Image (cartoon, grey):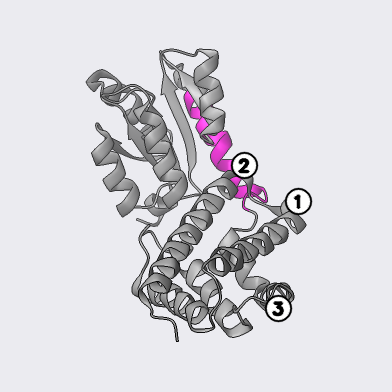
């Protein structure tokens, strides 16, 4: 039982029955614990439900390029997972898109069994032995929270913003909380923080542009923090983290603007 738990877990995704009947058993015999999915929906369910060390996905699952959708989901939800694309068409464009989608490697059909096992094993072993994961953006912000908040607060005061240090801290904490969650919608706490910020701007008689300016300065300070720590970043997850950060910055801004427009001037 203990031996089974130590076996690397593989999610194998392919809509071809013949492939599903041949490759997964070989991986199983080679020391991997393999779960097989035959559709994108089943693969997404597995990614959201169970932890995996390796993803091997066909490039075209039902629709062309579906494999990149599966990889993107795995990168977002399980960033430590090693991702392979399985394709019968090793065109240059496919390899380029694989790199852009942060695929660790791609395998060409028909797959040479020993090459498949060796490639998967090498990627898994290298991630276990090396300094594979740098910082995640939410962790970096948490670790530098005090200096970050003070610096942004000083910048805000120079620009006559109503965003004081305590409010900035609440906004920043709300963003980090959202980034660590799987949901892409604002949670009630984050929505309330954004709403309070909009009301504060309106109450002090400042123009609506102050909201956008304050949030932009908040974002600029985060970008500066990233720049100062870029040599230790985990590049496999940085783009995803930045997209989520910008996504929630946008939602918070919209909520603040909505609150500002609904509140009557004092």
Q: Picture coordinates of residue 4 (x, y %)?
A: 37, 50
Q: Is residue 241 above or below residue 146?
A: above
The residue carrying mark 3 is 157
Of the numbered discs 2 and 3, the one sitting upstream in the chain is: 2
Residue nearer the viewer, 98 or 20: 98
Residue 8 showing in the rendered view:
no
Judge depth for marks 1 and 2 and give the one in front.
1
The residue carrying mark 1 is 231
Q: Is residue 30 left or right of residue 100?
A: left
What's drawn in magenta, residue-wise? Answer: 116-133
Label number found at residue 126: 2
Q: Residue at x 54, y 41 (%)?
A: 124
Q: Quadrant of residue 11?
A: top left
Image quadrant where one finds the N terminus: bottom left
Cα distance in 3D space between marks 3 and 1: 31 Å
Q: Is residue 253 left or right of residue 28?
A: right
Q: Residues within 10 Å of mark 2 (few under 14, many from 20)?
A: few
Q: Is residue 210 above or below residue 115?
A: below
Image quadrant where one finds the C terminus: bottom left
Q: Residues within 10 Å of mark 3 (few under 14, many from 20)?
A: few
Q: Picture coordinates of residue 46 (x, y %)?
A: 30, 46
Is residue 111 within the magenta segment?
no
């Amino acid at each position: 039982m203990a031996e089974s738990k130590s076996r690397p877990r593989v999610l194998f995704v392919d809509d071809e029955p013949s492939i599903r009947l041949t490759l997964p058993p070989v991986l199983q015999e080679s020391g991997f614990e393999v779960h097989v999915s035959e559709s994108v929906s089943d693969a997404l369910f597995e990614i959201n439900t169970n932890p995996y060390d390796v993803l091997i996905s066909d490039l075209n699952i039902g629709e062309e390029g579906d494999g990149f959708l599966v990889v993107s989901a795995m990168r977002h939800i399980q960033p430590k997972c090693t991702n392979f694309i399985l394709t019968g068409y090793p065109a240059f464009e496919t390899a380029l898109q694989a790199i852009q989608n942060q695929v660790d490697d791609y395998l060409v059909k028909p797959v040479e069994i020993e090459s498949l096992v060796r490639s998967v094993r090498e990627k898994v072993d290298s991630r276990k032995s090396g300094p594979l994961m740098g910082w995640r953006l939410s962790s970096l912000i948490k670790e530098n929270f005090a200096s970050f908040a003070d610096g942004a607060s000083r910048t805000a005061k120079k620009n006559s913003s109503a965003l004081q240090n305590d409010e900035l801290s609440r906004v920043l904490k709300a963003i980090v909380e959202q980034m660590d969650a799987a949901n892409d919608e604002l949670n009630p706490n984050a929505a309330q923080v954004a709403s309070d910020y909009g009301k504060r701007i309106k109450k002090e008689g400042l123009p609506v542009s102050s909201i956008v300016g304050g949030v932009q300065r908040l974002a600029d300070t985060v970008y500066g923090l990233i720049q100062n720590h870029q040599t230790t970043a985990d590049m496999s997850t940085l783009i995803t983290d930045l997209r989520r950060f910008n996504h929630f910055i946008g939602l918070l801004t919209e909520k603040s603007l909505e609150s500002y427009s609904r509140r009557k001037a004092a």
